[in-house]
Amino acid sequence: MSKYDLPRTEEVDLLDGFVTNKKPEPFYYHYLGLINYIIQRAFVRYKFYSKNFMIEEVQQEVFFNLLKYDYDPSRGSLKNWIILISYRTAYRFLKKEGKYTIEYTDDNDSYDIVSNIINKIELDIVSHIHAVELLSIINENLSKLSDIEHLVIKLFYYDGLDSYQTAKCLGKTANSIFVILHRSRSKLKELIKKNHPELFLDTL
């Protein structure tokens, strides 16, 4: 358990002070280190060697997005939501700088990601579906998972981290990552089958 895993009441108090601007500093200073770590991981992943002012720019954008998007406690912990927002913000910045990101990738990258996910969750999808289109469908259904499930799939299959790297990034054990990964794959498979039955050979 990391220092960012707080009881729900403490999370609510920190977030409320930040959102209402009554006491934003405790939230800011408590989560700044986590946000920095996620931004730097994303930059290293895409071999983007930044100046300090660029990291600060992304930091500020993360805090803006934390105000912009409402936190839903039913989807998971505040820490996992902050990690997810931090990753998304960093990737948007990388796109702006002309680097590949998870959400904006070329056909070859799309094919590799899609093939990996489809093989792992054992989906018999028709072969003529375009990789970019299929990646969009996968992303659409990923957003319906809990924050931690969403994050583990992204880090494992999109960013190419192994279970130990993913565990370190999220402050969990490798065993817990295996459990979350198994659960996430099962849920993702059922969501895709439910929301896009036209993709499957046995429904044509």
Image: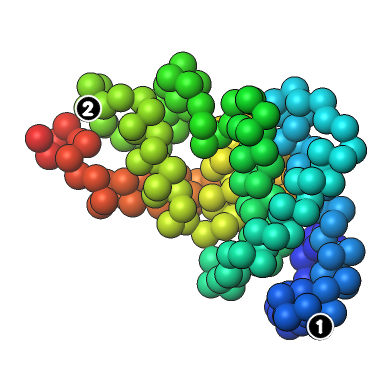
**Which mark, by number, is residue 126?**
2
For mark 1, give the secondary structure: loop
> Which coloring applies here?
rainbow
Q: Is residue 195 above or below residue 135?
A: below
* Circle 2: residue type: Val
Examine the image and state in which quarter residue 147 appears. Answer: bottom right
Q: Residue at x 78, y 54 (%)?
A: 60
For mark 2, give the secondary structure: loop
Q: Residue at x 26, y 31 (%)?
A: 124
Q: Nearer the viewer, mark 2 or mark 1?
A: 1
Which residue extends farthest left?
204
Residue 131 visible within the image: yes
List the residue tagged with mark 1.
22
Q: Is residue 40 above or below residue 69?
A: above
Q: Is residue 188 left or right of residue 174?
A: left
Q: CA distance from mark 2 to mark 1?
A: 54 Å
Q: Is residue 58 above or below residue 62?
A: above
* Circle 1: residue type: Lys
Q: Is residue 186 above or below residue 46?
A: below
Quarter of the picture holding the N terminus: bottom right
16 or 8: nearer the viewer: 16
Residue 188 visible within the image: no
Q: Is residue 159 left or right of residue 49?
A: left
Q: Position of residue 138 (x, y in %)?
A: 40, 41
